Image (spheres, helix red, strand yellow):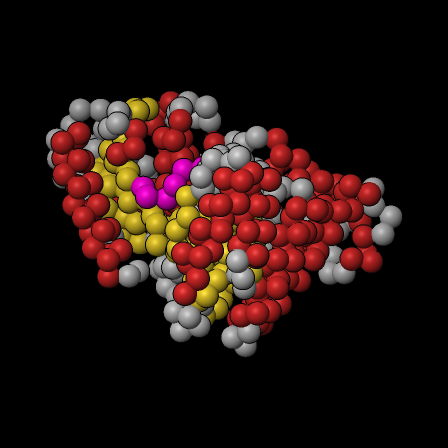
C-alpha cells in the first residue's frame, strides 16, 4: 500500500472507531481490513476448478466488531451497520439467522455468521459490526466478498478459531452460495485472503494451492488502470448461473468431473455448438493463465498484454459475458496503445482493466472518456490500482 493510501486507511479506521462508539456506545474490539480484487486473467475458470491469477487491490472493506456482553442485554443479537448505509442498524438474533432473513448488503456479513454457526466446535456469540468500504459497489471488484472476508477474519480472531486461509475461503464461498444465493466460485475470497503486496496470486481452484507471482509494476514502468463502466452487474441474476450450468453440461457430456480435466480444444468435439463455445472459453482461458504466469516470470509484459486481449475476445465471443461498455473500454485503451486490456470479474457490466505504460495514464483515460461519450454511455470512473496485501487485522 502506498504511503498516501496507508494514511487514508488510517484516517478511515479512526473515523470507523468513532462511528462505532457513536452507534453502539462502546469502542470496537478491533478493526479488520479486507481488500477487493482485480483479476488479471482467468475468468469463470474458478468454478470449473481451473486456474486464476487475481491480485488484491488497494481498496478495501474495513470491519469493526465487538462481541456482545454475555451477561448484558440480548447477548445473541447480531447488529450490522455501515458508513454507506446511513448508519442504519440491521438486527437479527442468532436463532433467526437463515437464508433470506437479512436484507440488503448486511446479508454478506450475516452469511459468514450463519456459516460459522453451522460448524461444530464454533461457539458463536452475538456481536455488533460497523463497516466502511472504498471498493466501488457493483464494479466487479469484489466489494461484496470484501465484506465477507472482513467479517470472517474478524470472527476468526475474536473467537480464537485458528482457521486456515483456505478454510476461510471455502467457508465464505459456502456462505455466499447458500445464504446469499449467488452461485459464485472461490476466486474472489481467496484473492482477498491470500494475496501479497506487489504480487499476483496464481491459484489452483481445485487444490487451493497458491503461489505469489511477482508483479513489480513500478519496476516495469507499468500500471493497471481500472475502467469502471458503472454498469452494475450482479451474480444473482441469471447470466452467471447460466454460464455455470453450460460448463456443468459440457463436463457431464464429456464424462469428466469438471472442465479442468480438459486441456485441449479438439477434446470438445461433438458437444452442442453453444455449450462447446462456452467450454472452449474455459479450456483456452486455463491455458492463458498458465502462459501469463510464465510470461510474468520472464518479465515479458508484451506477452501478458497479448493474453489479456485474447482473453477479452474469448469472453466477448465464446462466453458472451461482455457488455458494449466493456468492449468500448478495451478497444479505446487498445487504440491508445495499451499493452493489454480485458474485462475483469463476472462480466455483464462492472470493470475493464488496461495494462499500460505509467506515462500514458492521462492519454489512455481521455481516450476512454471520449469513446464513452461518442457511444452515448455514462462517463466511466477510471483509476489506477496496485497489488496489495491480503486481509488481516488493521
Ligand atoms: C465473480 C465470482 F464471484 C467469481 O467466483 C468468479 O467466477 C468471477 O466472477 C469470474 O471469474 O467475481
Q: Quadrant of residue 103?
A: top left
Segment tinted magenta in the rendering: 133-138
At which x and y percent is residue 120? 41, 41
Vertical placement of residue 378 versus 34, above or below: above
At which x and y percent is residue 278? 72, 45
Give whichever of 349, 99 is nearer the camera. Answer: 349
At which x and y percent is residue 381? 41, 43
Q: Is residue 137 magenta?
A: yes
Q: Is residue 267 left or right of residue 98?
A: right
Give whichever of 149, 366 is nearer the camera. Answer: 366
Q: Looking at the image, can residue 231 be seen?
A: yes
The residue drawn where x is 26% and y is 27% is: 86
Number of on-image labels: 0
The residue drawn where x is 40% and y is 73% is: 219
The residue drawn where x is 24% and y is 41% is: 64
Q: Is residue 385 left or right of residue 42?
A: left
Position of the N terminus, as image quadrant, is bottom left
The residue drawn where x is 60% and y is 40% is: 324
At which x and y percent is residue 257? 71, 50
Q: Looking at the image, can residue 142 be seen?
A: no
Q: Quadrant of residue 7?
A: bottom left
Main SS category, magenta section: loop
Residue at the far bottom: name it.
298
Residue at the far right: name it.
270
Amino acid at each position: 500500500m502506498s504511503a498516501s493510501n496507508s494514511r487514508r486507511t488510517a484516517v478511515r479506521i479512526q473515523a470507523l472507531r468513532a462511528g462505532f462508539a457513536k452507534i453502539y456506545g462502546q469502542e470496537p474490539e478491533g478493526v479488520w481490513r479486507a481488500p477487493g480484487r482485480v483479476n488479471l486473467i482467468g475468468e469463470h475458470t474458478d468454478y470449473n476448478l481451473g486456474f486464476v491469477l487475481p491480485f488484491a487491490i488497494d481498496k478495501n472493506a474495513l470491519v469493526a466488531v465487538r462481541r456482545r456482553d454475555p451477561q448484558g442485554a440480548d447477548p445473541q443479537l447480531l447488529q450490522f451497520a455501515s458508513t454507506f448505509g446511513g448508519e442504519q442498524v440491521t438486527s437479527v438474533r442468532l436463532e433467526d439467522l437463515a437464508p433470506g432473513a437479512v436484507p440488503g448488503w448486511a446479508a454478506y456479513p450475516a452469511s459468514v455468521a450463519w456459516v460459522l454457526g453451522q460448524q461444530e466446535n464454533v461457539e458463536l456469540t452475538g456481536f455488533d459490526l460497523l463497516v466502511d468500504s472504498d471498493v466501488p459497489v457493483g464494479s466487479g471488484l469484489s466489494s461484496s466478498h470484501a465484506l465477507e472476508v472482513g467479517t470472517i477474519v474478524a470472527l476468526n480472531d475474536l473467537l480464537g478459531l485458528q482457521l486456515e486461509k483456505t478454510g476461510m475461503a471455502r467457508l465464505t464461498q459456502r456462505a455466499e452460495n447458500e445464504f446469499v444465493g449467488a452461485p459464485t466460485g472461490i476466486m474472489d475470497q481467496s484473492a482477498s485472503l491470500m494475496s501479497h503486496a506487489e504480487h499476483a496470486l496464481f491459484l489452483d481452484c481445485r487444490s487451493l494451492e497458491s503461489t505469489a507471482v511477482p508483479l513489480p509494476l513500478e519496476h516495469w514502468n507499468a500500471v493497471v488502470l481500472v475502467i469502471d463502466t458503472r454498469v452494475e452487474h450482479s451474480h444473482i441474476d441469471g447470466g452467471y448461473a447460466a454460464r455455470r450450468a453450460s460448463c456443468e453440461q459440457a463436463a457431464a457430456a464429456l464424462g469428466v468431473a469438471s472442465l479442468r480435466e480438459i486441456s485441449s480444444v479438439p477434446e470438445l468435439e461433438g458437444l452442442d455448438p453453444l455449450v462447446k463455445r462456452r467450454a472452449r472459453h474455459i479450456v483456452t482461458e486455463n491455458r492463458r493463465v498458465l502462459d501469463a504466469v510464465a510470461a510474468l516470470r520472464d518479465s515479458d509484459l508484451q506477452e501478458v498484454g497479448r493474453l489479456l486481449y485474447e482473453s477479452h475476445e474469448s469472453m466477448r465471443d465464446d462466453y458472451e459475458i461482455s457488455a458494449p461498455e466493456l468492449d468500448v473500454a478495451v478497444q479505446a485503451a487498445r487504440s491508445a496503445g495499451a499493452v493489454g486490456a480485458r474485462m475483469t470479474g463476472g462480466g455483464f457490466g462492472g470493470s475493464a482493466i488496461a495494462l499500460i505504460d505509467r506515462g500514458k495514464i492521462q492519454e489512455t483515460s481521455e481516450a476512454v472518456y471520449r469513446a464513452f461519450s461518442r457511444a452515448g454511455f455514462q462517463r466511466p470512473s477510471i483509476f489506477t490500482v496496485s497489488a496489495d496485501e491480503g486481509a488481516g487485522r488493521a
